[in-house]
Image: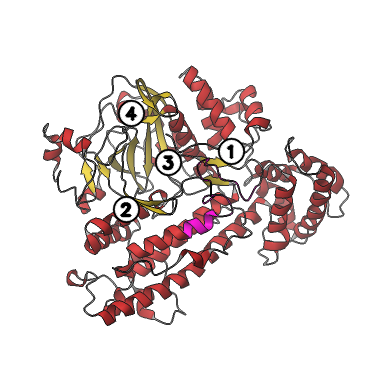
Amino acid sequence: MIRNFHRYKAFTTFTTRPFSTLLSKARPAHINTTSTHNMTLTTLAGLKKSSSFTEQLLPDSQVPTVEAALDPEVIPKTRLQRRVHSGIFTWVAPEHRDAYQFLIASPNAVRDLGLEESEIKTDLFKKIMSGEEYFKDPYPYAQAYSGHQFGQYAGQLGDGRVINIFEGRNPDTNVRYQVQLKGAGLTPYSRFADGKAVLRSSIREFLVSENLNALGIPTTRALALSRLPQTTARRERRETCAVVARMAESWVRLGTFTFAKTTDGVEMTQKLADYVIDELLGGESNLLAPKADYPDANVQQNRYVRFYREVVKRNAEMLAQCQVYGFLNGVLNTDNTSVLGLSMDYGPFAFMDTFNRNYSPNHDDGNLRYGYKYVPTAMWWNLVRFAEDMGELLGSSVIGDTSKLSKDQFGRFKANEQLEQAQVVVSNLVDDIGEEYKTFYKNKLNEGFRQRLGLTETRESDHDEIFQSLLDVMEAGSLDYNKFFRTLSELSLKADGSTTEACVEKLLESRQENAFSDRPATKHAITEWLTKYIARAFSEPETAIEQRQAVMRDHNPNFVLRNWVLDEVIQAVEADPTSPVLGEVLTMATTPFRRGWAELGVSGETERKFTGPVPANSIDSTCSCSS
């Protein structure tokens, strides 16, 4: 076994002065990619369904077939089983609940799945997405995975309350999504939990999934939300339960590889890696190209090395995009890290209110492992654990195979000399890819800053002189992170500086009322930075100057899904499940860059309230892992 070859200390100096985030270069974040114009949409019944995960990977040896799962003698045992010792998924269907109340669906997610929006109103859609009914073909299942949580190996975890119900391929885009239900009941991976999800956390996940997608951040999605009016669970208090229908191109995590390696060894690890490469990523042609300047060509041409680098790149860039908008996942463990680079599993998350490099949204994260300043290092730590699980595959080039290992070469290094050679190869490789990780992250981060500041030219000096200095001003002055950017995008700046003083006063409005900073000092710092920014912005070509504000408005949200907004929505829905505020906030969350939402059915009161100042007692609030 190749393990523990790379130490956490290698990255301890990476984020002493972290940056903020950015958006995809391919298209502006808010562009709606789900327009129904000329799209071939279908019904839920007509959607072609599959289950590539169960077709290509091995089932739980104790429930080897669907027939076994249907056996009334087996079902109770599998639901109460605490550990699975072989295989990577278990056939299991949603539990029956006494009552179901469908609340809402995301039209954007429904269209991305390939369904007509009218399907939301059908009984079949409501029953399938709430778990009241399920398709028998393909049969539902729960995935196994392990994980490291807060830096410690946590053993076997898995879908403890999530049940995957089918894969559906959008007939127009050809993108395939795996649909699952969170809160659908006990599975063999529930351990000592209850298989339930409460309404509070389900509302949070439903809204933030769609909000991050609208911001252009790679994320898992939320299809629908249903309330279970007669089902409760004990968390901090007794709470009503719910089911969230989620979808993603894959739910395979770094921890899925840990489970494969620790249960069935390198054979299952390779089988899982091949599944992700060939089935989910579309083959080797879609992986990062080998590095031309790497001294060992065999190592770089190894498909598993290229796969590892692809996973590193995707997660580095996703994290950078989160940082651009001040979004933090407070439990970014290896079991919450996607091999496709998707933000996923939303527990104690938050968008920062005031900019604070030490902020973590998780009130149990006393060491700030997942705080803004430290989370890039935490992500790399996760990716090093992934390299350990992939060790034999990454080092396989030492036995002469540079592509796909043959069956009799499953990491069976025939001599200690080969094993030692492989360990050196992998250790050096991970050190090298660690440098790539920094580059992927920083480049994406700087790109995002340029977009938020309306700059079109890439200049190396911007990182420290414009971007980092702005964060310093924000942090010292207790400035509202996202409000500052949005306000800046609305200002009429002049190259001669004639409007600078008035603009500074407007930017000071993003200073929190309870800020400990000195207002005159903050005003002076903003003035100095704004003077530098004006000079930098007006040094660009005239066409870029003219488009600056339009670009900024396209990348600086007018609505931010803050914790206090979520709390207001939760209270309203708990008091009245038919409250319109859930739909109104979903509308704002999926169109966050707009100047107004009246024509989309959002009341003026809701708009004013949720785009207004953060209540003083809610600034930079934290929450628990309880869900």
Could you say which disc has been placed on residue 130 in the image? 4
SS category of the residue bearing label 1 = loop
> What's the distance in space between the residues labelled 2 and 3, CA to CA?
20 Å
Could you say which disc has been placed on residue 221 in the image? 3
Q: Nearer the viewer, residue 76 or 465?
A: 76
Reading the image, the residue beneath label 2 is 256
* Mark 2 or mark 4, earlier in chain: 4
Reading the image, the residue beneath label 1 is 592
* Mark 4 or mark 1, earlier in chain: 4
Image coordinates for residue 10, horizontal then vertical, percent: 50, 68
SS category of the residue bearing label 3 = strand
Task: Specify the segment rendered in magenta.
Answer: 356-380
> What's the distance in space between the residues labelled 4 and 3, CA to CA?
16 Å
Q: Is residue 198 above or below residue 18?
A: above
Q: Residue at x 68, y 66 (%)?
A: 459
- Point out the frontmost of discs 1 and 2: 2
* Mark 1 or mark 2, earlier in chain: 2
What type is the residue that disc 4 sits on?
Ser
- Residue 174 on the magenta span: no
Q: Residues within 10 Å of mark 4 (few under 14, many from 20)?
A: many
* Mark 1 or mark 3, earlier in chain: 3
> What's the distance in space between the residues labelled 1 and 3, CA to CA?
16 Å
> What's the distance in space between the residues labelled 2 and 4, CA to CA?
26 Å
Q: Horizontally, is 158 left or right of 353 in the view?
A: left
* Mark 4 or mark 3, earlier in chain: 4
Image coordinates for residue 194, horizontal then vertical, percent: 31, 32
